[in-house]
Image (cartoon, helix red, strand yellow):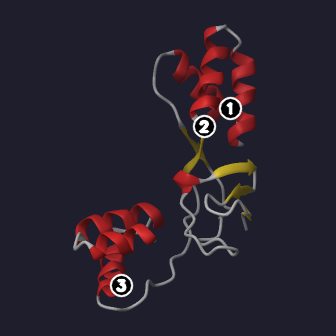
Amino acid sequence: MDEVHRLLGKGRLIEAIKRYRELTGVGLKEAKDAVEALRDGGSLPPVEAPRGPTAGPTLTPAQLQDVKQLVEAGRTIEAIKLVRLRTNIGLKEAKDAVDALRDGHPVTTFSVASQQQLPMHCPICGAAVNAAELKWVSPDAAECAYCGYHLRAQ
C-alpha cells in the first residue's frame, strides 16, 4: 500500500485508486471509497482476500526460458512437469500453457482454481500480499516478496 500512499501524496487520485484495485482485487466503487477515505485522513478498510479462480503463480524469466528450451527440444512432457513443479497448477492447465508456448503465444501467468486464500497482509512485516509479486513455494504457500516469510493459504 506504500505505492497508493505515494500516489496520493503526489495528488494522483485516479492512479492511486487503480493501483489499490490491482493490489486488492476490489471493485471500482470500493477502491474509490477506500482511497478517498485514506486521502481524507482515515485508514484503509479491511479487504477480504479473493477466492475462486484467480491469476496464479508466474514463472520467472529464467524458468520461462527453461520451459521454452524444453518445448523447442520436443521435450513436451518434461516442460509440462516443470511448469507444474514451478506453479503448482493442474495437469490440464500446464499442458495448455505449454501448448500455447509451443504455438508461439506468450504465457507467464497461470490460472489456479482454489478455494484457499492467502492472508491480505504478511503477519511478519505487514506488507500487502500482491499476487503479481508472489513466489509460490508449495501448492498452499507463497513467499512474501518483502521479508521472505512463507504465507500459508487458509
Tell me if mark 2 has few (under 14), some (14-19) or many (20+) residues whose alpha carbon lies within 10 angstroms of its own: many
Residue that badge 2 annotates: 59
Tell me the SS state at disc 3.
Answer: helix
Q: Residue at x 36, y 76 (%)?
A: 30
Please determine whether, in this image, residue 12 is positioned above or below residue 54. Answer: below
Residue farthest to the bottom, as pictured? 41
Of 58 and 8, which appears nearest the observer? 8
Q: Amino acid at mark 1?
A: Val
**Residue that badge 1 annotates:** 83
The residues tagged by marks 2 and 1 sit, at their Cα atoms, a distance apart of 8 Å
SS under mark 2: loop
Residue 104: image location, x then y, percent:
47, 17
**Label 2 close to label 1 by CB (< 8 Å):** yes
Observer-side mark, 2 or 1, equals 2
Question: Mark 3 sits on what residue?
Answer: 38
Residue drawn at point x = 60 percent, y = 37 percent: 59
Residue 98 to residue 4: above or below: above
Quadrant where the image shows the C terminus: bottom right
Foreground residue among 144 and 99:
144
Q: Position of residue 83 (x, y in %)?
A: 68, 32
Q: At which x and y percent is residue 96? A: 59, 27
Whether residue 89 is visible, yes or no, is no
